[in-house]
Image (cartoon, rainbow, N blue to C red):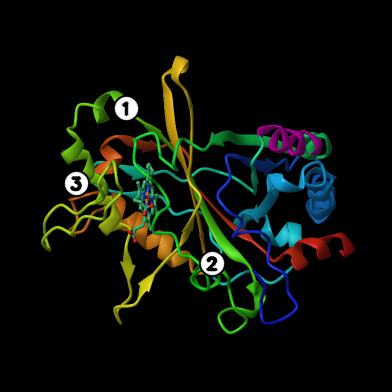
Amino acid sequence: MTTNSNVQPQAVDAPLTHFATFLVLTVKDDNPDAIKTVRSTIASIKDLSKNITMRDLNAMFTCTVGIGSDIWDKLTGLPRPAELRPFQEVKGKKHTAVSTPGDLLLHIRAERRDLCFEFERQLMDRLRDTVTLTDVTVGFRYFDLRDLLGFVDGTANPVGTAVPEAVMITAERDPAAVAGSYIVVQKYLHDLTAWKTLSTEQQEAVIGRTKADNIELDDAESGQQQSHKTLATIEDENGNEHEILRDNMPFGSPSSNEFGTYFIGYTAQLWVIERMLERMFVGDPPGLHDRILDFSTPVTGSTFFAPSASVIASLEDD
Ligand code: HEM
């Protein structure tokens, strides 16, 4: 993905891989050298990544860095992206999208688990004394892109020229954020025992697609219970649909009875994902929330901004 200027984006549009590690870190404020170390480590991500990429060029290794609202000014000293703010808790009648801390997000992707592991090891060797671990989740591809609820996840993602349109901020929209993207992450835990009490038809109505062959179902009548697919479809007042790029990954451990989906959404307009969350948790009409939430509980929720690769590399000079 390239921009019309010389500013290089990060690899936010990297293809879906078989493995991903989602690392959320908080910078220690009791360590005076922390910011400096974090800044120089982030600036050298390109070199760190190259070291891993070169081990197997076919493994599509990438790492995207996101920076949280609270640390942005101190870490970058740059103007703030217009929409950068902490994740806003969304409280519906029954379910809440919790907001949890996080200064840095590392979205590490590859076709090989060992490359993700090795990158994380080399990164943490540098960062260990300067950050606390908020969350690390190791995701894996499950069959033909299925989530652990059994549905194909990612179908409605934009493709081709629709990708930069959905995720990349243009100079016209926000000169301070050019070639960057907002990222929202939420770690969901599923109650698979309860989910399995639903018939396939009931599960399909919750999601809005058929389970075996992934065919889209019609929206319900206005005012009725809508599916996840419909509640996550955002139109503005002119009837234009606003897409986001998702790279959700299953994670978990059957022996520990842990089954989850790590949601990650990239967008050029943060309000689009915020509106999706509002519609899912509060419901449309209010009270008729997304029924996926009766079987899926978010335990984290954080917002980040992924600046262009050029901005990331320039941090070293400060
Ligand atoms: C669609 C699963 C959370 C946004 C879908 C689909 C599945 C799915 C199976 C249908 C296939 C597809 O188009 O990808 C899940 C699961 C979640 C989750 C298991 C967590 C438990 C979220 C969240 C958001 C979101 C938190 C946004 C804030 C979307 C969007 C679509 C979608 C935009 C496409 C809608 C369309 O057809 O245009 N999701 N999702 N999802 N989901 Fe989710």
Are there few (<14), some (14-19), or many (20+) residues within 10 Å of tag 3?
many
Looking at the rendered structure, the secondary structure element under dot 3 is: helix
Q: Quadrant of residue 180?
A: bottom right
Which of disc 2 and disc 3 is earlier in sequence? 2
Principal secondary structure, stretch drawn in magenta:
helix
The residue shown at (53%, 61%) is 85
Q: Amino acid at mark 3?
A: Ala
Q: Amino acid at mark 2?
A: Val
Q: Is residue 291 highlighted in magenta?
A: no
The residue shown at (29%, 55%) is 229
Residue wearing tag 2: 167
Residue wearing tag 1: 192
Residue extending farthest right: 317
Q: 140 or 267, which lies in front? A: 140
The mark total stands at 3
Q: Position of residue 80 (x, y in %)?
A: 64, 69
In space, the residues marked 3 and 2 are separated at their CA atoms by 29 Å
Looking at the rendered structure, the secondary structure element under dot 1 is: helix
Are there few (<14), some (14-19), or many (20+) residues within 10 Å of tag 1?
some
Residues drawn in magenta: 113-122
Residue 2 visible, this angle: yes
| In the rendered image, the vertical position of residue 31 relative to residue 160, given as above or below | above
Left or right: 97 in relation to 268: left
Q: Is residue 121 highlighted in magenta?
A: yes
Q: Position of residue 269 (x, y in %)?
A: 49, 69
Q: 305 or 204, which lies in front? A: 204
Residue wearing tag 3: 205
Q: Amino acid at mark 1?
A: Leu
In space, the residues marked 1 and 2 are separated at their CA atoms by 32 Å
Where does the N terminus fall, quadrant-wise? bottom right
In space, the residues marked 1 and 3 are separated at their CA atoms by 17 Å
Residue extending farthest top: 255
